[in-house]
Image: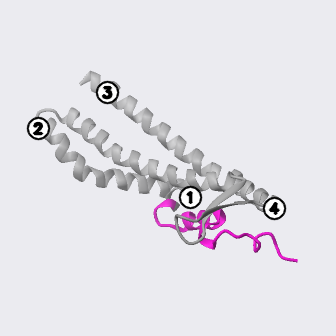
């Protein structure tokens, strides 16, 4: 008797479980799977490197010698845009894999874009994929949503401070 996984006609690299593993093992997408300190460190480094672009833009609008507060807040906001785009890319990648794992049918291409097929998952694969989503991917999505929320609070705090400068 053949197992349901080996009966799957979807090419190996297009199977949602393998897409999940590739995402988890990738240099960029595994950031959100790291412990909290390493995760925040990666985002902090992204924010600091973004100052290479943010500082000249902020200095063009607010001369640091005259308007230090505005320069720092404006630069921080610009640098945060890069962090926001990084988080958005992480969210979209993990969201795509989550949708593929949650779906009851899988769209795949056998040899090119012109010959797409769909395959209905077996009950065993559907159960395995749903467990993976519930216990592995949902905590990742929650972490990303919380990080977005924290960024929004920082933006709100920065705008309140801006009004007092």
Give the CA separation, mark 4 to mark 3. Answer: 54 Å
The residue located at (18%, 36%) in the rendering is 68
In this rendering, position of residue 22 left or right of residue 65: right
Which residue is the extreme one toward the bottom?
1
Q: Nearer the viewer, residue 11 or 73?
A: 11
Examine the structure image and report whether residue 18 is included in the region drawn in magenta. Answer: yes
For label 3, count other residues whose C-alpha is less than 10 Å away and answer few (under 14), some (14-19) or many (20+).
Answer: few
* Element marked by disc 3: helix
Q: Are marks 4 and 3 in contact (CB under 8 Å)?
A: no
* Nearest-to-viewer mark from 4 and 3: 4
Q: Are marks 4 and 1 in contact (CB under 8 Å)?
A: no
* Residue receiving disc 2: 65
Q: Are marks 1 and 2 in contact (CB under 8 Å)?
A: no
User: Does 72 sit above or below residue 5?
Assistant: above
Give the CA separation, mark 4 to mark 1. Answer: 26 Å
* Residue receiving disc 3: 161
**Disc nearer the start of the sequence (4/1):** 1
* Residue receiving disc 1: 33
Q: Which span of residues is magenta-colored?
A: 1-29
Q: Position of residue 114 (x, y in %)?
A: 53, 64
In this rendering, position of residue 58 left or right of residue 40: left
């Amino acid at each position: 008797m053949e197992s349901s996984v080996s009966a799957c006609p979807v090419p190996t690299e297009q199977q949602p479980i393998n897409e999940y593993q590739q995402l988890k093992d990738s240099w960029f997408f595994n950031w959100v799977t790291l412990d909290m300190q390493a995760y925040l460190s990666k985002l902090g480094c992204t924010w600091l490197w973004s100052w290479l672009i943010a500082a000249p833009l902020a200095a063009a609008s607010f001369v640091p010698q005259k308007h230090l507060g505005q320069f720092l807040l404006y630069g921080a906001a610009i640098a945060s845009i890069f962090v926001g785009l990084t988080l958005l890319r992480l969210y979209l990648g993990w969201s795509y894999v989550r949708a593929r794992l949650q779906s009851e049918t899988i769209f795949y291409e056998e040899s090119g874009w012109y010959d797409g097929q769909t395959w209905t998952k077996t009950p065993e694969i559907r159960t395995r994929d749903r467990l993976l989503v519930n216990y592995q991917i949902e905590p990742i999505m929650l972490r990303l949503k919380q990080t977005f929320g924290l960024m929004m609070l920082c933006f709100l705090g920065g705008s309140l401070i801006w009004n007092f400068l």
